[in-house]
Image (tube, grey):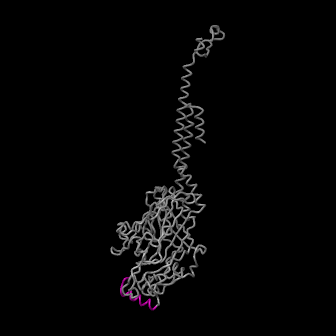
Amino acid sequence: MCAVSVLVFAAQTASPLHDPLRMICCYYLFLLGAHLFLMSQQEIVLVEGSRVFDSWKKPPPPVYMQFYFFNMTNPKEFLAGTKPEVKQIGPYTYREYRYKDNVSMVANGKMVSAYNTKSFVFLREKSVGDPAEDNITTVNIPAWVSHELKNFWKASMVSIWMNSLKSDLFTTRTVDELLWGYKDPLLVRVAGTKPEVETVFGLMYKKNGSNDGEFIYHTGEQNYMDYGRIETWKGQRELTFWRSNYSNSIVGSDGSAFHPLLDKDERIHIFTPDLCRTIYMEFEKDVEVKGIPAYRFTPPPSVLASKEENPDNEGFCVTPKECLGTGVLKVSPCRKGAPVVASFPHFYLADNKYVAAIEGLSPERTHHQTFLDLNPTTGVIVRAHKRAQVNILMQRIPGFPTTRSLNETVFPVMFLNESVEIDDASSERLKKLLLISNLVSNFPLVIVGLGVILLMVFVILLCRARKQKSSAEDDTAYSPVNDKEKEDPQNGTYIGLTPKANVEA
């Protein structure tokens, strides 16, 4: 309204006396722009009172965790030297509730401390079966953990224990047991000599209602590029598991928050405690989710490439000689020495030899790719799929006769798909926030445009006024009306405004 008033007023008069009004209107326009700018700044910082802070502490969109298992169909033949055959079974879907616990401001309010707590509730309607009843035949992971001691005499002792317990290198357990834990008889026996050994095993054991330790994040108040960036994890600025500073670096966010104003050319870094490392993602393509524009970021092949293909990854080798190929990562340094190997599902982006070694695998980009769809203006996640596979490295073990015919194999146990998509209510709030951001980002252009228009109108009208005044001065003459009136002392002297042409006539 103020801008329109200024334009109308300028059209009515070009007098310099009215410049203060135009200045006042522009001043209020500036104040409005500054107010919008401050509002947007307060929306995207991790401080009490900002709109994103509550969503960051307790994300509103539902998160789903799906588990897929590889059921072993020929365990005896495999131990005899043939190729293993597996059949994928799943999903077993859980609603994942995640929230930041024990949130507190630290470092004089420049950073925020929090614990990422997760809990899971089973959803039967989104699952293929009942996890309490469905059985899966898979690798007896506790047995392989014990064998990884690589000591002939200890391996022989474990072999004797397993024979007495009628335990094998493969086991059949329910989905519930494999996920949330069961008391393993071999671990009970081992705990008799090593009390520190946990007698219960489960792929998600103690992860329901737990957290990964304390994170300290930057709020982004001082620098928007630091929004959500991890300062420390468990009090550490870097890890100690790996063999290089690059491999041990803790960089980027935890995957729940990203800085605004994302660029297609940048790499976004995510620290993942489950992988015991930082990974990175790169721009793939533009997408749209519920009317919200987004950039899709995905991990490139170089993230899990071999040291030959990506020399930076040499630090992830457990030892210089113990280094796997492209697409797999042995995470035993942070898994108490257990021969656990991480990869993407079905060995997507991995060397073909890992896929060819297992009958029943078929990597597909659509179903097995990890990606993040981020709104570039705000950095908000509008859709995401985190997909990872748990494997066990199986190989011959001296002192353990059952493995004498075994070929070294990275055996798939399970893969997970952790997914989220922005809900309708959150998408509407985000659209409003984007509207404010667009107003702020375009406000300087609007001010400049209005200023240019006002200046042009002012100059045009001023020139027109001067031209009209000059024309009037040139075309107007002053002369007496007549001699009688000129000489009449009662009427005084009269001046008539008549054109020159009439006077001369």
User: Residue 391: image x %, image y %?
Assistant: 45, 76
User: Residue 68: image x %, image y %?
Assistant: 52, 75
Quadrant for the N terminus, please: top right
Q: Is residue 29 above or below residue 68?
A: above
Q: Which residues are magenta?
A: 149-164
Q: Quick check: 199 left or right of 397? A: right
Residue 251 appears in the rendering: yes
| Residue 178 part of the magenta-drawn span | no
Quadrant for the C terminus, please: top right
Q: Nearer the viewer, residue 127 or 375?
A: 127
Q: Is residue 163 above or below residue 378?
A: below
| Residue 162 part of the magenta-drawn span | yes
Single out the residue that lies furthest toward the left: 320
Q: Quick check: 410 left or right of 501? A: left
Q: Nearer the viewer, residue 206 or 216?
A: 206
User: Residue 167: image x %, image y %?
Assistant: 46, 88
Splitting the image into 4 quarters, where does residue 301 fall? bottom left
Q: Is residue 323 above or below residue 433?
A: below
User: Residue 334: image x %, image y %?
Assistant: 42, 74
Q: Is residue 36 above or below residue 195?
A: above
Q: Nearer the viewer, residue 26 or 348?
A: 348
Q: Quick check: 247 left or right of 384? A: left
Q: Nearer the viewer, residue 461 or 227?
A: 461
Please identify the dominant SS of the magenta region.
helix
Residue 109 appears in the rendering: no
